[in-house]
Amino acid sequence: LRTLALKHPVIQAPMAGVSTPEMAAAVTNHGGLGSLPVSHIDFTRPDAVEELAAAVAEFTSRIENTALQTNVNLNFFCHEIVGEATPLQQDNWIRLYQRVLGTSISSDSALFRNSQVSFKELEHEEHLGSLDRLLLYFEHEYRPRAVSFHFGCPCAQTVRRLKALGIHVFATATSANEACVLADTGVDGIVCQGHEAGGHRGNFVESNLRFDEALSTLALFQLVRQLISKRAARPFLVPAGGVMDSATIQYYLSQGAAAVQLGTAFVASPESRASVHYQTVLADGVARLTTVMTRIVSGKPARALLTPFLKNLELSYRGEELPPYGPMYNAFKTLRSKKPAAMDFYLVGQGYSLIRPGLSAGEIVDSLCANLSVPRADPPVTRK
């Protein structure tokens, strides 16, 4: 709470496609840490910083206390760089969706464009100028309280450069070995993403991508806490996944968590881009549906509602080689923009039946934190 200047130990998950500057500002205004996903911005472009500045300006314009205008977490995707989709992968994907939708799909050059440019691109020699432009923006224009990374983490040198600016660096781990990699890289905090969490898994160690242990949030947090306790410099630990009520938050705090991260709890708030869809889903009683971890939509594992469309997609897949993450997800989103009713895909965690429709993001923070007892902090640990 001292480090991030928070009233409540709650971080709003940076849900790409769902979170908005309005949602982030509401959480920050009510004492938590709002998050802005910026993974949609290609920071190799010369005008990328201007696009980021516009999103930041929309956030800060909604902050009621000027002292809190930097209280935000900017979230970047940091996956391994992927290549373009091959003609065979494109054909396989098109045939799969033609079977599912029962209609012809024409291919064009934009359909399989890689719309997810990784932060790792900025660490390649040809894009170091882009990284410098971003860090200069942080140094002279706007210094966020935190930045976070999903699907991996930048190199130790980049982490040091961010921390030298007074920015706190967080990254996601889904296994013990990933947590150790992040701790060795020097991050300030590790988001322990359990298997029950909604949205995309943050796996990034190759062995974990192939053989995911599927640890629950509790099991992962306990394991990582044990490993981190043996280190001289101990990152903050932030459980994420299945956290939907005050009792769960209180338990994790009592066990040494620095904060918790919640995403599903906010998806039906009026500040959410998905609010209309989720209000309809919940009103129709679709809460009886199960959730499933699927790779078939984006190419990376993600937890979503098992809607009739997603079930049909899974059953229609015959093991063909499909495009990699970036091109594959762009093709799905492009096609869904033309057929939204036929392609209902809701990223959500296992605890979604506990969503409280009608509450604003700020009211959700207030209700979760009204009766929390925050344990006395240990003496600060030097984070080198």
Image (cartoon, rainbow, N blue to C red):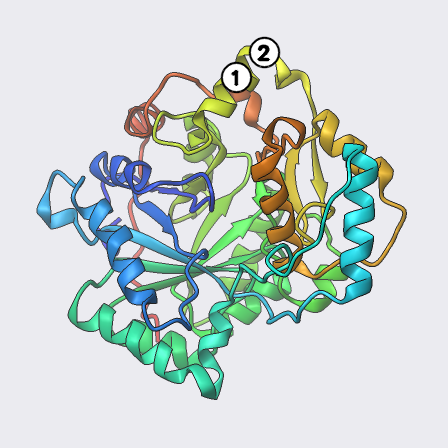
Nearer to the camera, 228 or 110: 110
Residue 194 seen by the camera: no
Outermost residue toward the top in this view: 284
Where is residue 329? Give x, y as percent. Answer: 62, 51
Residue drawn at (49%, 46%) of the image: 239
Type of amino acid at the residue the image marks with label 1: Thr
Disc 1: which residue: 280
Q: Are marks 2 and 1 in contact (CB under 8 Å)?
A: yes
Left of 106 or right of it: where is 18? left
Left of 106 or right of it: where is 269? left
Left of 142 or right of it: where is 230? right
Where is residue 342? Give x, y as percent. Answer: 67, 28
Residue 199 seen by the camera: yes
Residue drawn at (77%, 35%) of the image: 103
Provide the secondary structure element on which disc 2 rests: loop
Outermost residue toward the bottom in this view: 125
Type of amino acid at the residue the image marks with label 2: Asp
Provide the secondary structure element on which disc 1 rests: helix
Disc 2: which residue: 284
Where is residue 234? Give x, y as percent. Answer: 42, 65
Nearer to the camera, 60 or 239: 60
Quadrant of the rendering where the C terminus is positioned: bottom left
Residue drawn at (50%, 75%) of the image: 121
Q: CA distance from mark 2 to mark 1?
A: 6 Å
